[in-house]
Amino acid sequence: MSTNAEIIPGIIALISSLIAMIMLSRVIPIIGGSIGRMIKMMVAGIFFSVFLHAGVELAAGFGLISEGPLMIIMGILITAGAVAFISAGSIGIKSLK
């Protein structure tokens, strides 16, 4: 099990990324269109990945996940975030045409 110095930043990251996702999800429907879709993908790429990453690290900190699976999960999360960024960039490029 990890110390408070390792767990508290993870909890803060988890809560702050959740708040950011909720706040942005309330704004996005107002924006709409291709810019709204682009922002949705960026939110997924940034804040959802941070939220999941912090949650998985907390699980490892509490001894629920060992180091081996943790590295695989982190690789998957980084890939999911990158795919969301690629999608956001694609939507942005198409909206400029």
Image (cartoon, rainbow, N blue to C red):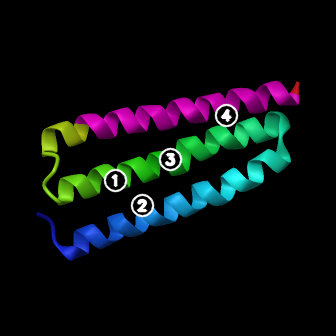
Quarter containing the C terminus? top right
Q: Which residues are magenta?
A: 72-96
Q: Is residue 75 left or right of residue 28?
A: left
Report the residue marked by disc 2: 14
Report the residue marked by disc 4: 88
Q: Distance between the Cα atoms at labels 2 and 3? A: 9 Å
- Decide: few, some or many residues near mark 1? Use Cα within 10 Å; few <14, some 14-19, many ≥20: some
Q: Tell which tag, 4 or 3, sits nearer the viewer.
A: 3
Quadrant in the rendering for residue 42: top right
Q: Secondary structure at mark 1?
A: helix
Q: Distance between the Cα atoms at labels 1 and 3? A: 10 Å
Q: Distance between the Cα atoms at labels 4 and 1? A: 24 Å
- State yes or no: discs 1 and 2 in contact (Cβ < 8 Å): yes
Sequence-earlier tag: 4 or 1: 1
Q: Tell which tag, 4 or 1, sits nearer the viewer.
A: 1
- Decide: few, some or many residues near mark 2? Use Cα within 10 Å; few <14, some 14-19, many ≥20: many
Q: Distance between the Cα atoms at labels 4 and 2? A: 23 Å
Q: Residue at x 68, y 32 (%)?
A: 89
Q: Amino acid at mark 3?
A: Phe
**Total numbered circles:** 4
| Residue 43 pos. (x, y %) | 61, 46
Report the residue marked by disc 3: 48
Report the residue marked by disc 1: 55
| Residue 33 pos. (x, y %) | 84, 35
Q: Distance between the Cα atoms at labels 4 and 3? A: 14 Å
Q: Is residue 73 left or right of residue 61?
A: right
